[in-house]
Amino acid sequence: MDALAQLAHGFSIALTPVALLWCIVGVTLGTAVGVLPGLGPALTIALLLPITFKVEATNALILFSGIYFGAMFGGSTTSILINTPGESATIVTALEGHKMARRGRGGQALATAAIGSFVAGTFGVVGITFLAPLIVDVALKFGPPEYFALMVVAFVAVSAVLGDSRVRGLTSLFMGLLLGLVGIDLQTGQARFTFGVPELLDGIDVIVVTVGLFAVGETFYLAGRHWMGRDEIVPVAGSVWMSREDWSRSWKGWIRGTLIGFPIGALPAGGAELPTLLSYYTERRLSRKPEEFGRGAIEGVAGPEAANNAAAAGVLVPMLTLGLPTSATAAIMLSALQSYNINPGPMLLNSHGDLVWGLIASLYVANVMLLVLNLPLIGLWVKVLQVPKPWLFAGILVFAMVGTYGVSRSVFDLGLLLAIGVVGLLMRLYDFPTAPVIIGLILGPLAEQEFRRAMITSQGDLTVFATRPLAASLLVVAVLLLLLPPLIRRWFARRRPDERTAGA
């Protein structure tokens, strides 16, 4: 009941005119960005970080969360209509959604995606409401060894599990950890990795790295990519409303996708890619019309879209309660909070309760706004796809550079922004994930601090990580996360030929 009372207080904040304005701006901008192929919530939030630097913290977080949820909604449009997922989590939606659009059922595909996103997003926010206080109660019992072990789990999960290559993921993580070491060591007062440059004594600003990698680097990559031709946009023909059969085939997928997506997203090793794949395979196994899969099965859109949005809500749980981001967007939102001198973690609900509960309440409002925006305005979002790309890329670069310079008033930071942008371009070209860089930059100094505290309290005894059951268990989980995925992939690789033989 305490959670319900806190939520009621949150609605008193979220329903104020200013908060509603920021929420509707966020969901509208997020949907528009989600529709544009190649862009996503991480890029948009990174771009707005410097611009919203002086906005009140609660309103800024409401804006960013609206963008996050809006991009999850909007990403289905580009996946279904032009078969170009804007986010990795919407790749599965494109498998069946684009086939439906080709068959003249694009409206029904967009409708089941929008309604499924609303259902899953709402249930996901309900999960945040009741799960967050429980996790905080557990996390308050953590000591320095447990926190360090938990951050190791996050490092391994984001870099070695969620990417295609463990080596590339761990290399990106190492880059982030290295950037986090730049500056004056708070404990010894010694300068580290500054190379005699005075501007580096205060460290490298997370905003500069975030905007450089996700806005500048991504824009360089998109602008330099050679297109073989214009993307063919499949027109939305007929009504967008679903038939009775479509409803009966969709609603179970919405529920199952939600139940799969939220728990996985809420794990410190979570994310949105795995639950969408699991949801797709589950729907294909349980469908009464499995022969339609591969030709445009509506269940193949309903389930993964629900899983995607439920996981997006779940990702906010470890970010708010433990200070652990498990996606690029969550990492950027974490850096936004830190720019306001707010450190997410177990004490956040007590020290900044208005911010947390106002944010959670605004997510309920955002889901309703998104349903109203997406279904009636599908034609408008399709026209967003026709925005000239040169104008879009030029605008992003101008906003990134002006915003970054406006925060620090430093020409050095501007040069550093462009240099990191070039690094981001090279990472995209050679398929290195960028999320581990940000997570290493943010969590690296915190992990170092917790490790030092553990060594001080144990008088330098490393066995403290083995003698404390929770810390030891978390480190075992990290090792399993590092070793098990390759074995699972090999098992699936051996099964695929058997499935094809059986199907023949």
Image (cartoon, helix red, strand yellow):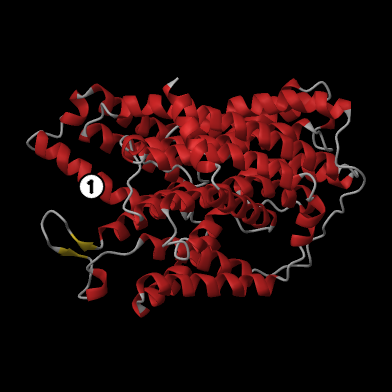
203, 381: nearer the viewer = 381
Residue 210, image x and y in percent?
44, 60
Q: Where is residue 261, by image quadrant? A: top right
Q: From this viewpoint, which residue is outermost toward the left?
A: 459
Name the kind of residue labelled 1 in the image.
Glu
Residue 51 spot, x, y in % from top left: 47, 65
Outermost residue, bottom side? 411
User: Which of the pair 331/276 is nearer the observer?
Assistant: 331
Residue placed at 63% from the left, 39% from the top?
Answer: 367
Quadrant (top left/top right/bottom left/bottom right) for the C terminus: top right
Residue on which disc 1 sits = 448
Q: Quadrant of residue 272?
A: top right
Disc 1 secondary structure class: helix
Residue 102 percent coordinates (x, y) = 87, 47
Residue 315 visible? The answer is no
* Residue at the image position 51 percent from the left and 63 percent from the top: 47
- Decide: few, some or many residues near mark 1? Use Cα within 10 Å; few <14, some 14-19, many ≥20: some
User: Where on the picture, by quarter, is residue 387?
Assistant: bottom right
Residue 364 horizontal/vertical position (percent): 58, 36
